[in-house]
Every structure is written in structure tokens, then in C-alpha cells.
Image (cartoon, rainbow, N blue to C red):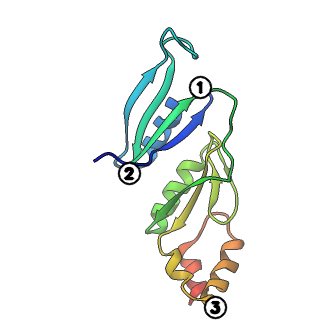
């Protein structure tokens, strides 16, 4: 059965580069199809129009649509990490050429926003008292530190 929802990402001529970057970071990821512009355009004949790829089984397409639209932090991709080592891997890899924000958010070199968070975050925020302490700790962090968040929750 095909998936009902695929995330579509708009790029300005670098969709294939982005897909190669993302698939190099995530395990079990691959480029599944590349479509190129033909005589009808609007891009140069033979250039990449759409690149389809999967990251950990999640489907994406990158469209080389031109400079008309840019990514914004109003939408982000969230990565739930089981260990600090996993969190560090995704944070450091996606940050290459990008910019850190705060509270586990970063913008990669293509302008796409990511949240790199511990998978236990909901558990850490399970009651109001715990949530206040954890949120106070999160607000002081750029990259999240699982051990520190666990200390704040305790």
C-alpha cells in the first residue's frame, strides 16, 4: 500500500545535492527516483526537476522549483533520538554548513529547520511540576543534553 502523505521540499536548483546530503546522514535511506526536465521546461533540459528519496522509510520529494519560495522555521522536521550519541550524530551532521538555534532546533545548509530531540521528551514532561523544570533546562540549551534534562526532571 502506498503512503498517503509525502513531504515535498522546494529547492532552488539543489534538490539532488540536498537529497544526497540527507541520505548520507540517515541510516536506511536512499534516493529512489530522479526526474529531469525535458524540452517543455521550465528548467534547463536534462537538469533535475524532482528527486524522490527516503529517510528511515519516510518518503520525501525535492523539487527544483526556483528561487520563489524559501524554507522557514514555521515548519520543521523532528528527529526523535534514543541516546545522546544518536542526538549528537544528527545534530552535528545536519549542522554542517547550517546554523544552530535554541531548544534543539537548527537550520541546515539548505535552510530547512530541524528539531533534534530526545525520544523521552514526552515522558520528561509528563506532569506540570516536572515539565516546568525540564522546560527551564531546555530554554538554556542550544543542542539538547539528555542527561541534563533527566536531572531537571528528577
The quarter of the picture where the C terminus appears is bottom right
Residue 121, numbered label: none
- Front position in the image: 68 or 133: 68
Image height check: is 76 above or below 51? below
Residue that carries the numbered disc 3 in the rendered image:
129
From this viewpoint, which residue is outermost toward the top? 39
- Cα distance, mark 3 to mark 1? 48 Å
- Cα distance, mark 3 to mark 2? 35 Å
Residue that carries the numbered disc 2 in the rendered image:
56
At mark 1, the secondary structure is loop
Taking the spot 53% from the left edge, 49% from the top edge, the residue there is: 93
Image height check: is 51 above or below 136? above
The answer to whether the residues at label 3 and label 1 have Cβ atoms under 8 Å apart is: no
Which quarter of the figure has residue 14?
A: top right
Q: Label 1 neighbourhood size at 10 Å, few (<14), some (14-19), many (20+)?
A: some
Q: Label 2 neighbourhood size at 10 Å, few (<14), some (14-19), many (20+)?
A: few
At mark 3, the secondary structure is helix
Q: Earlier in the sequence, mark 3 or mark 2?
A: 2
Residue that carries the numbered disc 1 in the rendered image:
13
Left or right, 104 with reference to 39: right
Taking the spot 67% from the left edge, 64% from the top edge, the residue there is: 142
Taking the spot 60% from the left edge, 88% from the top edge, the residue there is: 130
From this viewpoint, which residue is outermost toward the left? 1
Where is residue 6 drawn, in percent x and y?
45, 45
Where is residue 91 drawn, in percent x and y?
56, 56
Where is residue 70 drawn, in percent x and y?
68, 38
Q: Earlier in the sequence, mark 3 or mark 1?
A: 1
- Front position in the image: 71 or 92: 71
Taking the spot 49% from the left edge, 22% from the top edge, the residue there is: 48
Where is residue 57 drawn, in percent x and y?
36, 50
- Cα distance, mark 1 to mark 2? 24 Å
Amino acid at each position: 500500500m502506498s503512503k498517503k502523505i509525502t513531504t515535498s521540499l522546494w529547492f532552488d536548483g539543489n534538490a539532488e545535492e540536498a537529497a544526497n546530503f540527507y541520505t548520507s546522514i540517515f541510516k536506511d535511506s536512499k534516493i529512489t527516483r530522479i526526474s529531469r526536465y525535458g524540452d517543455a521546461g521550465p528548467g534547463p533540459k536534462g537538469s533535475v526537476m524532482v528527486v524522490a528519496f527516503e529517510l528511515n522509510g519516510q518518503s520525501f520529494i525535492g523539487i527544483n522549483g526556483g528561487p520563489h519560495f524559501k524554507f522557514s522555521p514555521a515548519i520543521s522536521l523532528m528527529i526523535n533520538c534514543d541516546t545522546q550519541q544518536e542526538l549528537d550524530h544528527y545534530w552535528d551532521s545536519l549542522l554542517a554548513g547550517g546554523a544552530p538555534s535554541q531548544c534543539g532546533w537548527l537550520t541546515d545548509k539548505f535552510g530547512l529547520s530541524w528539531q533534534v530531540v530526545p525520544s523521552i521528551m514526552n515522558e520528561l514532561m509528563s506532569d506540570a511540576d516536572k515539565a516546568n523544570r525540564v522546560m527551564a533546562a531546555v530554554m538554556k540549551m542550544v543542542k539538547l543534553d539528555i542527561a541534563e534534562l533527566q536531572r531537571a526532571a528528577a
